[in-house]
Amino acid sequence: MGYHTYQHSPQACVIEGMSSPSSSSSSAKNPDGLICYEDAIKYWTSVEPSVNGVLGGYGESTSVPKADIVGSLTFVRRLRNRFSNEPGKIKYGLDLGAGIGRVTKNFMHTVCDKVDLLEPVKPFVEKMKIELQPLMKQGKIGEILEISMQDWVPEEPGRYYLIWCQWCCGQLPDADFLKWMDNCRLALQKGGMMVVKENNATGTENNDIYDPVDSSKTRTDANFRALFRKAGWKILSTTRQRGMPPELYPIRMYALQPMEEEEEVEYE
Ligand SMILES: C[S@@+](CC[C@H](N)C(=O)[O-])C[C@H]1O[C@@H](n2cnc3c(N)ncnc32)[C@H](O)[C@@H]1O
């Protein structure tokens, strides 16, 4: 997510050349086929390891970082009676696509006993280790996994009380997204919760927008809901992030739990 994940006309696809934003290129129809993991890592490795870098130019001189953290905290606090840790287990958090550790540093450590972070980009991991020094000294940081979400296989089933995935699951095409959700289910404690916080493209299920800058896609709310259902997760609650600059895509938080077998899903 950078400048490019914000409200803009879909740009010309790097593969197809300079088609106009309004042209009906196959990129608009099949963004999944255009996602390239290597290009994504190359892009993120070239980005300054700072809040400004991971937030695409919406750093600390803007309202975005603060509004984002306040929104996340409020959302999780509102849900505190709807999820719990498994008796006797540590309240472990997992911060996915963690960048320089912004989410853990400002928010996750306050709701979890300990947080693991997953981030594939080396300069971000190096900066994260500096940013999180004080929390490491307090014993609040667990493992730092230097891998991509699509390569992650949970080593300890039922480890996590809260899994947080923000502004990074657009890096995965739908097929890998579904496999990744299966891994999340395996990794979650009984009673635990996962939150996906992402930009939303407008339109129906098939209107996801490819972003050539970081080789990701921005999903519609309809596609998120369809994928959650397909992967066997129910939405406990969902809300729109408030207080963001008007030029940005709408941002939505989805609080999720695995469906019980035969459970009816209620969507808001
Ligand atoms: C927009 S930044 C968001 C960082 C962080 N979640 C935050 O909100 O501050 C996107 C992050 O996703 C990471 N990323 C890119 N491809 C990824 C992948 N395949 N798996 C996991 N993370 C990925 C990037 O390196 C970058 O740190």
Image (cartoon, rainbow, N blue to C red):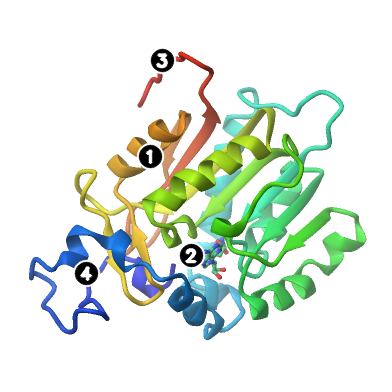
> What's the residue type where badge 4 is placed?
Pro
Which label's residue is closer to the chain start, 4 or 2? Answer: 4
Mark 2 and mark 3: span between their CA atoms? 39 Å
| Residue drawn at x 72%, y 37% as measured from the top left | 157
Please give the residue where the numbered disc 1 appears in the rendered image.
227
Q: Which residue is mark 3?
A: 264
Q: Nearer the viewer, residue 211 or 58?
A: 211
Tag 2: amino acid: Ser
Q: CA distance from mark 1 to mark 4?
A: 23 Å
Q: Specify the quadrant that holds the C terminus.
A: top left
Q: Is mark 3 within 8 Å of ligand 1?
A: no
Left or right of 143? Residue 74 is: left
Q: Give the mark nearer the N terminus: 3 vs 4.
A: 4
Please report the residue visible at 52 percent of the width from the left and 54 percent of the height from the top: 166
Tell me if I can see residue 202 in this picture. Answer: yes
- From the top left corner, tell me how far across and down residue 47 is, in percent: 53, 82
